[in-house]
Image (tube, rainbow, N blue to C red):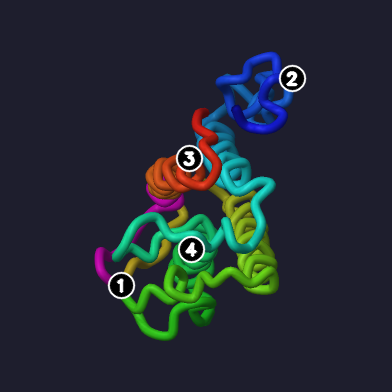
């Protein structure tokens, strides 16, 4: 049994429903509100899956030869937010944070068990999330377009759906990584 689990009202769940920060958000909202809320919940899920872990656990790899780790996921999602919202939507010059060349997987390969590296990853991720949230809030509508150099124009609407999908896919990875670390599973 996991420490502290026996005192929980719902021991088989990650957090009790009344304590879940993903609950109680807006419902019956318009399209923007709905998409932003789903994205918020996916981001919070990533944070929950990483909560309470030290640098060694954050950097622990899944299985050889994969470089997948929770820390790598945080770094990767900082890069994803930065790439889509700063570079493609806002058209800013924003160099990659963790990768030196496209496809180099520096966000995963550089995820080492160092508390400073973990803090840097969370700081970068939170900064990119804040930029995204400002960009979305200030956009006049969801038809605003950015440019994906590989696929052409993309609307803010499409991008928000993509971001929910991107986080959801990687949160599935986070579930498995966390279970490997300490057995915690669930929501």
Q: Assign a secondary structure to mark 4.
A: helix
Can residue 60 be seen here? The reply is: yes
**Is 73 drawn above or below residue 11 in the view shown?**
below
Q: Nearer the viewer, mark 2 or mark 4?
A: 2
Q: Earlier in the sequence, mark 3 or mark 4?
A: 4
User: Looking at the rendering, which quadrant does residue 26 occupy?
Assistant: top right
Residue at image location 40% in from the left, 53% down from the top: 155
The quadrant of the image that shows the N terminus is top right
- Find residue 179 and report its horizontal and vertical position in percent: 48, 40
Residue at image location 51% in from the left, 70% down from the top: 111
Label 4 environment density (alpha carbons within 10 Å; few <14, some 14–19, many ≥20) = many
Residue at image location 73% in from the left, 25% down from the top: 19
| Marks 2 and 4, how far apart at CA | 32 Å
Residue denoted by label 4? 72
- Point out the stretch of residues depicted in magenta: 150-161
| Marks 2 and 3, how far apart at CA | 20 Å
| Marks 1 and 4, how far apart at CA | 25 Å
Label 3 environment density (alpha carbons within 10 Å; few <14, some 14–19, many ≥20) = some
Q: How many marks?
A: 4
Label 2 environment density (alpha carbons within 10 Å; few <14, some 14–19, many ≥20) = few
Give the residue furthest to the top: 9
**Is 178 drawn above or below residue 62 in the view shown?**
above
- Find residue 120 and report its horizontal and vertical position in percent: 66, 71
Label number found at residue 149: 1
Looking at the image, residue 165 sits to the left or right of residue 150; the answer is right
Q: Nearer the viewer, mark 2 or mark 1?
A: 2
């Amino acid at each position: 049994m996991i420490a502290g689990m026996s005192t929980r009202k719902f021991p088989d769940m990650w957090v009790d429903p009344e304590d879940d920060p993903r609950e109680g958000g807006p419902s019956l909202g318009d399209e923007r509100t709905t998409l932003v809320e789903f994205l918020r919940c996916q981001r919070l899920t990533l944070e929950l899956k990483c909560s309470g872990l030290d640098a060694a656990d954050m950097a622990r790899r899944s299985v050889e030869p994969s470089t997948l780790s929770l820390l790598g996921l945080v770094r990767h999602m900082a890069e994803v937010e930065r790439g889509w919202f700063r570079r493609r939507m806002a058209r800013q010059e924003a160099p990659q944070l963790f990768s030196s060349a496209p496809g180099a997987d520096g966000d995963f390969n550089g995820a080492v068990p160092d508390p400073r590296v973990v803090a840097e990853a969370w700081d970068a991720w939170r900064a990119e999330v804040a930029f995204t949230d400002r960009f979305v809030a200030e956009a006049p509508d969801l038809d605003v377009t950015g440019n994906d150099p590989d696929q052409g124009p993309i609307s803010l609407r499409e991008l928000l759906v993509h971001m929910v999908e991107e986080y959801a896919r990687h949160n599935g990875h986070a579930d498995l990584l966390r279970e490997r670390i300490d057995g915690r599973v669930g929501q």
